[in-house]
Amino acid sequence: MKKIFAILLALPLLSLAQKTAKTYDLLLGGYTGTNAGKGIAVYRFDTQTGTVNFLNQFEGVDNPDFLAITNDSKFVYSCNVDPKGAEAQVSAFRFDKTSGKLELINKQPAGGINPVHIILDKDGKNVMISHYSSGSLTVLPVNKDGSLGPVSQTIQYTGSGPHRNQKGPHVHSAMLADNGKKLLVADLGTDHINIYNYDSKKQQPIITENATAEMTGPGDGPRHMEFSPDRKFLYVIQELSAFVRVYKYDNGKLAFIQAINMMPADFTKNSAADIHLSPDGNFLYASNRGGANNIVQYAVDKSDGKLTFVDKFDVSKAPRGFTIDPSGNYLLSAGQEGNTINIFKIDKTNGKLALTDNKIDIPQIVCLKWVSVD
């Protein structure tokens, strides 16, 4: 009788363990061609063990460098760089998360040159593409069948900055805030974060004039942005200065809090890239390329958003993109030039990274996205 009672008591615990043992599809975007990848690769990832298994690969588009996935995981969108500098394309796919298979629906001209980021709005009605070389942001509508319509809106930026890489505007990323009602756009070329009103239900234009434009430090080069889980603080990585800037965010307005350098003062080869918070918001990680090739870890003070340096970790060469799995157990860093994705176990008590024996050997990956399978 005691044994039966003990088993009954253990059943809820076993059920809880099964619910937390999540499996995800990992979608990888990057560059194709000589000495590069073959398209969008899909792997199965176990968040309990950190093991990966290849599922599928789609080879029908060139240079699918960045990806966006609908909330229901049925459709995937990639921006496709033209290697000769012509107008880019954007591709729409159906996605089967069970098999990892992608099926091309259609392609459209992306309306700009050298796209480096793509997002979907909250309702999955539009994709927005950040174009580095043309210094523009374009919007394409998503049809009910997942296909893409032609460009419906273009925002063209102007201006420059003091750094040699800031001869013109370079839009590098965009993200939505305030339940999809605000749009933040980082322009690396002019050191600005532009904030717009956004309404997918409006007649054109759905993006209206910016309510505010926050300037970072001269020559910073704002690149990627990350909100704290409570959406009160915004963290922006600066490619050219290798600073992380912290802002308080409130209804479309930014208030500067802190700037913290990722590198020693005498280090000149900065090329900061990606930035992510742990799911619990306790730690922030930022990647730096150049001669550094590492990921820097900070502790987060949730009361005021400020960062404190904790440690740095060597990774495969040119960590342009990295990701933390949704369970917060592992960090995966893609070495674009090292042609390896390192898989680190995260110690959730102190946030530190421990390199595992698991890895993915694949060239020229810059974007990593998750889809829940179970």
Image (cartoon, rainbow, N blue to C red):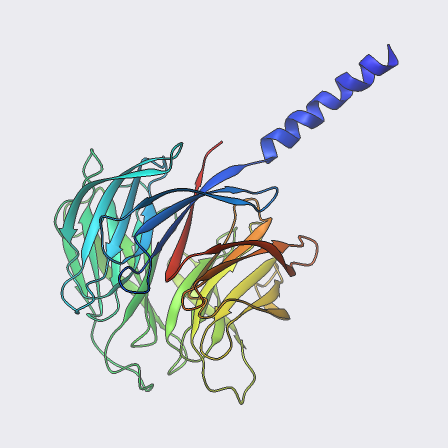
Counting from the top left corner in percent of width and height, residue 88 is at 18, 60
Counting from the top left corner in percent of width and height, residue 240 is at 40, 79
Q: In this view, does 56 lie above or below 312?
A: above
Residue 328 left/right relative to 12:
left
Residue 125 visible in the displayed image? no
Q: Dividing the picture into quarters, in which one does residue 189 lie? A: bottom left
- Outermost residue toward the front? 35
Q: Which is nearer the eye, 154 or 362?
A: 362
Residue 70 visible in the displayed image? yes
Counting from the top left corner in percent of width and height, residue 279 is at 55, 50
Q: Which residue is rendered at x = 15% and y = 55% of the image? A: 153
Q: Which residue is rendered at x = 65% and y = 25% of the image? A: 15
Q: Is residue 119 above or below residue 211?
A: above
Q: Which residue is rendered at x = 22% and y = 51% of the image? A: 61
Q: Tell me the quarter of the image containing the N terminus.
A: top right
Counting from the top left corner in percent of width and height, residue 288 is at 48, 72
Q: Which is nearer the eye, 339 or 239?
A: 339
Residue 13 left/right relative to 24:
right
Q: Is residue 216 above or below residue 39?
A: below
